[in-house]
Image: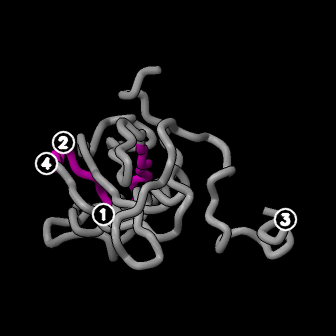
């Protein structure tokens, strides 16, 4: 499997409140969106609603986005540790496919009920919803699990 191959599943519309003083997409807004998307991805990959961002490598702002641009965010798991998950992120312009930002490594840690790192038990990427944490399942489904 090519780990550099990223699926772009989340889209955002760059609106006036997302702009910086130069009239382009504010990096802080983009990082907030990426961290939120990466958290959801980590929850689904590790099957636990209690995960935290541990580390982000160098953030490479390749180009910018303007008001009205449609952007898409992609993530790909690159490594499963015993209690962690490492992923790669890219954000690009949805229309032109031009890269806006890349992050080579974002590391999330799986937490137990006590708030300490806990083994998650996975070694491979899932594309199903079989790891959705019980607290996110409908009551009838959670009772059967």
* Distance CA(mark 2)–CA(mark 1): 23 Å
Whether 29 is drawn above or below 12: the answer is below
Quadrant of the image occupied by residue 74 = top left
Q: Are marks 2 and 1 in contact (CB under 8 Å)?
A: no
Report the mark closest to the observer, 2 or 4: 4
Check disc 4: other Cα within 10 Å, few if <14, some if 14-19, many if 20+: few
Q: Earlier in the sequence, mark 3 or mark 1?
A: 1
Please tell me the numbered disc located at residue 144.
3
At horizontal 36% and vertical 28% (from top left) the residue drawn is 4
Q: Earlier in the sequence, mark 2 or mark 3?
A: 2
Label 1 SS: strand
Whether 37 is drawn above or below 123: the answer is below
The picture places residue 31, in percent across and down from the top left corner, at 27, 62
Report the mark closest to the observer, 1 or 4: 1
Q: Earlier in the sequence, mark 3 or mark 4?
A: 4
The picture places residue 57, in percent across and down from the top left corner, at 17, 49
Query: Quick one: 14 or 115, which is closer to the camera?
Result: 115
Q: Which residues are magenta?
A: 59-75
* Distance CA(mark 2)–CA(mark 3): 47 Å
Check disc 1: other Cα within 10 Å, few if <14, some if 14-19, many if 20+: some
Check disc 3: other Cα within 10 Å, few if <14, some if 14-19, many if 20+: few
Report the mark closest to the observer, 3 or 4: 3
Please tell me the numbered disc located at residue 84.
none
Residue identifier under label 4: 58
Can residue 53 be seen?
yes
Q: Is residue 112 left or right of residue 88?
A: right
Please tell me the numbered disc located at residue 53.
1
Residue identifier under label 2: 62
């Amino acid at each position: 499997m090519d780990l550099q191959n990223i699926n772009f599943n989340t889209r955002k519309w760059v609106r006036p409140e997302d702009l910086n003083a130069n009239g382009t997409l504010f990096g802080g807004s983009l990082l907030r969106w990426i961290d939120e998307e990466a958290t959801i991805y980590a929850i689904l990959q590790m099957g636990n609603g209690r995960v935290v961002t541990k580390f982000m490598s160098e953030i490479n702002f390749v180009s910018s986005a303007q008001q009205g641009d449609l952007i898409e965010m992609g993530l790909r798991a690159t490594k499963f540790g015993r209690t962690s998950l490492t992923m790669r992120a890219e954000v690009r312009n949805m229309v032109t496919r031009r890269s806006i930002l890349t992050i080579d490594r974002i590391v999330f840690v799986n937490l137990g009920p006590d708030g300490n790192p806990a083994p998650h038990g996975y070694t491979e990427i899932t594309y199903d919803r079989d790891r959705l944490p019980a607290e996110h399942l409908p009551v009838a489904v959670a009772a059967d699990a």
